[in-house]
Image (cartoon, rainbow, N blue to C red):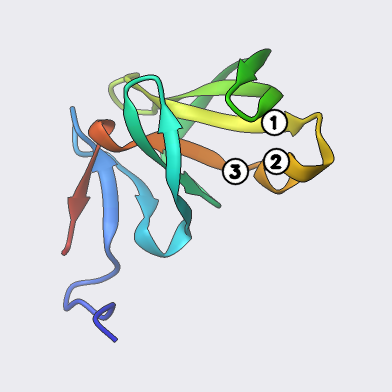
């Protein structure tokens, strides 16, 4: 009900340069953790660039991930899951994790 805001969709922007990087409607989960605190899993992200793919040991096992940078200011905002090695984690593939303290709400 409270999702229709005059002026468009609710968005998340880079905390440094206010580049729009994700839509509230694309949040898959708010229950993610990063080294620096809470993080959100998004089905899509926009105006971001992915870094080099690497295998990284995460709390939920080994994953191939790539750091995600703001396309404007190059700040690292989170990471993208490129590949999950465990069957139970496959739902993360192709999705983006953005750290809560690196994004700001717009249009709320």
Circle 3 Cα neighbour tier, 10 Å, few/some/many (<14 / 14–19 / ≥20): many
| Residue 41 spot, x, y in % from top left | 49, 45
Can residue 103 be seen?
Answer: yes
Q: In terms of depth relative to the viewer, which is nearer, 88 or 47? A: 88
Left or right, 98 with reference to 37: right
Q: Is mark 3 on a helix, strand or loop?
A: loop
Secondary structure found at label 2: loop
Q: Which residue is drawn at 18% across and 27% down?
A: 16
Residue projecting furthest to the bottom? 1
* Residue depicted at x 46% and y 40%: 32
Q: Position of residue 5 (x, y in %)?
A: 20, 76
Compared across the picture, whether 86 is left or right of 15 comes to right
Q: Mark 2 points at which residue?
A: 93
Quadrant of res 69 = top left
Label 1 to label 2: alpha-carbon separation: 5 Å
Find out whether the residues at labels 1 and 3 contact each other: C-beta distance under 8 Å: no
Question: Which residue is more in the foreground, 54 or 57?
Answer: 57
- Total number of numbered labels? 3
Instruction: Look at the numbered discs 2 and 3 and tell me whether their residues touch, using CB distance below 8 Å.
Output: yes
- Residue plotted at (57% across, 32% down): 80
- Callout 2: 10 Å neighbours few (<14), some, many (20+)? some
Instruction: Give the residue number, with chain letter if any, for mark 3.
Output: 95
Q: In 3D space, how far apart are the residues under numbered discs 2 and 3 (Cα atoms)?
A: 5 Å
Q: Quadrant of residue 100?
A: top left
Residue 107 sits in which quadrant? bottom left
Where residue 24 appears, as percent x and y from the top left, is 36, 60
Work out how far the residue at label 1 is from the one at label 3, CA to CA, in angstroms: 8 Å
Label 1: few (<14), some (14–19) or many (≥20) C-alpha neighbours in 10 Å: some
Q: Quadrant of the N terminus?
A: bottom left
Specify the label residue 82 is tagged with: 1
- Element marked by disc 1: strand
């Amino acid at each position: 009900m409270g999702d229709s805001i005059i002026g468009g969709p609710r968005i998340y922007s880079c905390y440094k340069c206010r580049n729009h990087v994700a839509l509230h409607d694309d949040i898959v989960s708010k229950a993610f953790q990063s080294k620096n605190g809470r993080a959100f899993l998004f089905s899509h992200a926009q105006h971001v660039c992915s870094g080099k793919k690497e295998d990284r040991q995460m709390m939920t096992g080994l994953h191939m991930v790539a750091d995600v940078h703001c396309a404007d200011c190059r700040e690292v905002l989170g990471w993208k899951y490129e590949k999950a090695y465990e069957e139970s984690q496959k739902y993360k593939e192709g999705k983006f994790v953005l750290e809560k303290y690196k994004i700001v709400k717009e249009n709320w």
